[in-house]
């Protein structure tokens, strides 16, 4: 069983910065990719940023140039540096890890709340 534990959420003023962390533990596998999703009240969960095992990254258009996703050398921890945040970034942020199997398994963290005040 794989567990993903997030940390780093909280309350931040608009224009400020926040760094989210997510670490995998338990029966840790080789992940093909790790990602951050978010879900705001009344909205669907959306993909914010993703990083492949090889380091390729992709971002939601609205966070490009403000957020940076990175992975540690063990490929079992992922980070999201959030700069120049705005109230529209307020959401619960979820860490995701995708396994290498077919079909691939998806693993999820419990979520961490990010609230941006104006």
Image (tube, rainbow, N blue to C red):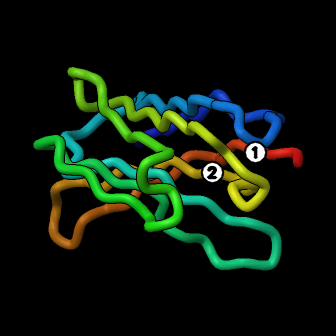
Provide residue 81's location: percent of width, then percent of height. Answer: 50, 34
Provide residue 101's location: percent of width, then percent of height. Answer: 17, 61
Provide residue 85's location: percent of width, then percent of height. Answer: 67, 45
Above or below 65: residue 27: above
Residue at which label 1 appears = 113
Residue at which label 2 appears = 93
Circle 1 SS class: strand
| Residue at image point 48% right, 51% down | 36
| CA gap, disc 1 and disc 2 | 6 Å
| Residue at image point 81% right, 69% down | 41
Q: In the rendered image, which quarter is residue 83 located in?
A: top right
Q: Looking at the image, do the residues carrying marks 1 and 2 touch, with CB atoms under 8 Å apart? A: yes
Circle 2 SS class: strand
| Residue at image point 48% right, 59% down | 48
Query: In the figure, is residue 21 to the left or right of 33?
Result: right
Residues packed near mark 1 inside 10 Å, few (<14), some (14 to 19) or many (20 plus): some
């Amino acid at each position: 069983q794989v567990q993903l534990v997030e940390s780093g959420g909280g309350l931040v003023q608009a224009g400020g910065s926040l760094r989210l962390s997510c670490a995998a533990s338990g029966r840790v596998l080789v992940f093909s990719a790790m990602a951050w999703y978010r879900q705001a009240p009344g909205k669907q969960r959306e993909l914010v940023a993703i990083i492949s095992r090889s380091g390729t990254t992709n971002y939601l258009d609205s966070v490009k140039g403000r957020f940076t996703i990175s992975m540690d050398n063990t490929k079992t921890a992922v980070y999201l540096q959030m700069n120049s945040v705005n109230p529209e970034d307020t959401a619960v942020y979820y860490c995701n890890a995708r396994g290498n199997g077919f079909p691939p398994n998806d693993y999820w963290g419990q979520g961490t709340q990010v609230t941006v005040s104006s």
